[in-house]
Image: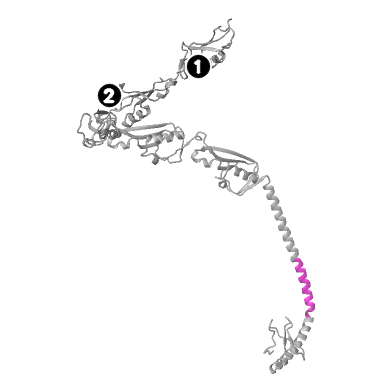
Amino acid sequence: MKSNTLICKRCKAPLEYEEGSSVMRCPHCGYTEKIDESDEITRERIRAKTYKETELGKRNIEKEIELGGKQLDLEKEKLGVTKTKYIIFTSLAVVAIATIIVLIYVVVTNIQHMGKVHIEQASDYYIGMDYEVTCNLLKEAGFEHIIGRSQETLTMQEKELVGKVIQVAIDGNPTFEDDWFAKDAVVTVYYGALDPKRANDIRIPLSRTDCIGKNYQSIIDQLTTEGFYNIKPVSFPDLSMDLQSQDGKITRITINNSEEFYLGDYFPADSIIQIDYHTMDPERITDVMIPASYDSYVEKDYLSVCKEFITAGFNNITLLPKYDVHFYEGSKVGVTQTVTVDGESTFLKGVWLPYDTEVRVAYHAKEFKYIGEDYQKISDMLSSIGFTNIELKPLDDLKMDELKKSGEVVSVLINEKELSEAGELNLLAQVEIQYHSEQQATDNEIKITATSKDFSGENYKDVVTTLEEMGFTNVKPVALGDLKKGWIHGEGEVKEISIGGVTKFAVGEVFDKNVEILVSYHSFPE
């Protein structure tokens, strides 16, 4: 290995070697390097030897100088030790004094804060916090005297604030900061509570805009259902018949004289709610419009003609059946012959008239049989024509053996006139359909549930009991005293029953509950 210098490659210090050695060594880091003899290395060896000898001479001189000043150094060392001891002592004294000062401060501070608690948060920190949580925090802080004060000012609209802190005051101070306070200080926690007068407020089910243009009665029903009861509807009769679609629609609504309310707001149940709405002008309320001109009804089915006028609002319609259709002319049945409105046969569509203006419809008809038909069928037929005032009258006239006739029409009266004899059939007329039905008992009557034969041969005591259970009140047993040996009839065996003199009766017959009933039975002579 060649080297151009005798300098350590690690620490850059001069390398040393012994005479005759082939290895150089660094006295500082221990690095070794093999000597590669060359002219240059040889010259370095010479220079190093010269340097060593020169340095050795210098060191001897310096050693003598050092020995000369050794005594002086010893004196300096003694002085340095003394100074170091002084510095250490002084530092310890300073530390001790500082420690004493800290201890004194702590003791004084503890004495000053004895019986006190520290609050890090300002008063605003607790506002909006749950009341119970606030009390717990103050208790944990060390306060011993905490008072809760409810502020009953909240409405149902603000019910989510119930139990939330409004203010915290310490010894009456509601604006405290981070500070120390006495443990026994009076801490008052004010929190929200419902106003008792508003606790029963009702939630409005709709907003003002939900009401405008709506039927006033439907809105009243909604408000009443929620619990509002002081509702004042105010009608404005200003509508003409061409605006009848606006009848009953709300134009303005106020709650306690205010139009400002919204869905979900709360109000007392007795709030004054005024609802303004349109109604028809009384002078024009009877008007109805003719639905079509006269010529459009020619050859039209009379039922459709009636329906058009009824739908338009006319209610005084009279039918004039012309019983002129023969058996082979069935296609003419129900065809309109003439229509007159208020006596006029040449009327026009769109004319407004009182709703009770008479409309007369004459049509071809064929006599139809209704006597003996099912009463419900006849009722449906008359309803389809347009009759609205139909009364069904069961006659309660059938005994048990006649029930097959039940429901059969006996008579149809139009304003107390028999249908077959009526030339005019006003649809407003009172219609009475009389039909056969099973005889029914009134409150003072009993419908018997057995025949006279059913009782014959039974023990009279059992028969008396049965009749009394039916509801009869005047049942009398009658002993006949007609037995000699009792071979044919047994003693107590019923021979005959008389109900008000009737000895033969069937199930379903009706008798007065107080009628005298005689139960005759066989017996031995007394």
Queried whether the magenta region covers residue 72, the answer comes back as yes
Q: Residue 140 at x, y = what percent?
A: 65, 45
The stretch in magenta equals 68-86
Along the polypeptide, which appears first: circle 1 or circle 2?
A: 2
**Residue at 79 percent of width and 79 percent of height:** 70
Up-down relation of residue 364 to residue 8 (above or below)? above
At mark 1, the secondary structure is helix
- Magenta span: chief secondary structure: helix
At mark 2, the secondary structure is loop
Q: Residue 250 at x, y = what percent?
A: 36, 37
Up-down relation of residue 35 to residue 153 (above or below)? below
Quarter of the figure with residue 67: bottom right
Asked whether 414 or 238 is in front, the reply is: 414
**Residue at 69 percent of width and 52 percent of height:** 106
Asked if residue 240 can be seen in this view, the reply is no
Quarter of the figure with residue 173: top right
Density class for disc 1 (Cα within 10 Å; few <14, some 14-19, many ≥20) is some
Queried whether the magenta region covers residue 121, the answer comes back as no
Q: Which residue is identified by label 2?
A: 422
Instruction: Check the image and name the residue furthest to the top.
Output: 526
Q: Which residue is identified by label 1?
A: 453
